[in-house]
């Protein structure tokens, strides 16, 4: 059993949990993920490791309730436990493969959209420990969806906040901030973009015109996390890859975004029906809820 030591709400829709998992914490690295299961009948959910402490034996996860399983996580409180926590899974971020000299020769830009702020944080924090201050763009639809701003400012060089509706700081999407930074004379030679799939696609379209190599973190539908089920299949550079074992990070310029976006919609109806059954309980009579 994996005990929940801390639970807090980070924004109007995002929650954080610090989970006791000593062995996992000793081996976790930025860019990796884990899979949690609430109980024997629960679905296995992949979540990025957004922080870890080997000395305390803890890992931190951040999630936004969307499907039934993640909504049920909200029922758990401090002192409760997950039945299973499996990890670390996936490959660490590619920046960990660089030597100190190579790292210092780069100018890093991180782009975080929505919940993508959580997996960006450990990479920026890791770079800070190497003496490197990366620039970070955090984007969300509205002010109440922004989180980790203070934590990010502690480890980043510059932090730029943008909201679609202009309710906080800059008004616009993350790509407009990239354009403006480049127009101001900023130069970058390595970008990491993490967030909604559509955001990562357009981020890559923007950075490509400035010839900035861009890595994205793919978190498509996953089931087993070992590459056997094939649910997280995607095409990268014309070849089939599996996000759980070959990623989750890939060269954003080589991803078949049209295919990925289409596959991400496959189970939306099923998820919606399951959520209705969960919310309505015994009163649920079926249907999609749209009529």
Image (cartoon, helix red, strand yellow):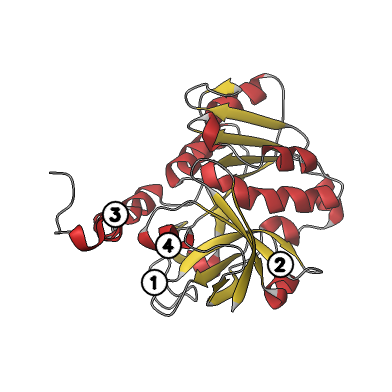
Quadrant of image for the C terminus: top left
Determine which quarter of the picture holds residue 62. bottom right
**Mark 1 and mark 2: span between their CA atoms?**
30 Å
Q: Which of marks 2 and 3 is nearer the N terminus?
A: 2
Q: Nearer the viewer, mark 3 or mark 4?
A: 4
Frontmost residue, 275 versus 114: 275
Label 3–label 1 contact, CB within 8 A: no
* Left or right relative to 107: residue 77: left
Give the mark, 1 or 2, whose residue is nearer the N terminus: 2
Q: How many labels does the image show?
A: 4
Alpha carbon separation for disc pair 3 and 1:
18 Å
Read off the residue under disc 4. Answer: 72
Q: Is mark 4 on a helix, strand or loop?
A: helix
Q: Where is residue 92 in the image (x, y as percent from the top left)?
A: 66, 63
Q: Mark 2 points at which residue?
A: 58
Cα gap from disc 3 to disc 4, whole angstroms: 18 Å
Q: Is residue 274 visible?
A: yes
Mark nearer the viewer, 2 or 3: 2
Q: Is residue 235 left or right of residue 167?
A: left
The 10 Å Cα crowd at callout 3, few under 14, some 14 to 19, many 20 or more, is few
């Amino acid at each position: 059993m994996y005990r929940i030591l801390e639970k807090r709400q980070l924004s109007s829709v995002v929650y954080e949990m610090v989970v006791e998992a000593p062995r996992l914490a000793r081996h976790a690295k930025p860019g990796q993920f884990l899979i949690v299961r609430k109980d024997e009948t629960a679905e296995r959910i992949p979540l990025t490791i957004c922080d870890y402490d080997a000395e305390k034996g803890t890992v931190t996860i951040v999630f936004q309730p969307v499907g039934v399983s993640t909504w049920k996580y909200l029922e758990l409180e401090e002192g409760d436990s997950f039945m299973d926590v499996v990890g670390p899974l996936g490959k660490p971020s590619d920046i960990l493969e660089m030597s100190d000299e190579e790292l210092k020769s780069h100018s890093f830009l991180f782009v975080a959209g929505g919940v993508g702020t959580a997996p960006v944080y450990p990479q920026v924090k890791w770079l800070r420990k190497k003496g490197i201050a990366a620039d970070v763009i955090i984007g969300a639809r509205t002010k109440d969806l922004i989180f980790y701003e203070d934590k990010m400012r502690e480890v980043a060089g510059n932090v730029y906040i943008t909201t679609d509706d202009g309710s906080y700081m800059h008004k616009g999407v993350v790509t407009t901030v990239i354009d403006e930074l480049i127009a101001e004379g900023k130069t970058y030679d390595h970008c990491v973009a993490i967030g909604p799939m559509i955001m990562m696609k357009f981020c890559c379209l923007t950075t490509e015109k400035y010839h900035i190599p861009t890595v994205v973190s793919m978190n498509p539908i996953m089931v087993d996390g070992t590459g056997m089920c094939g649910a997280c299949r995607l095409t990268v550079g014309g070849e089939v890859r599996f996000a759980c074992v070959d990623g989750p990070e890939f060269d954003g310029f080589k991803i078949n975004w049209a295919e990925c976006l289409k596959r991400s919609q496959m189970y939306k109806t099923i998820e919606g029906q399951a959520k209705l059954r969960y919310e309505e309980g015994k009163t649920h009579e079926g249907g999609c809820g749209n009529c």
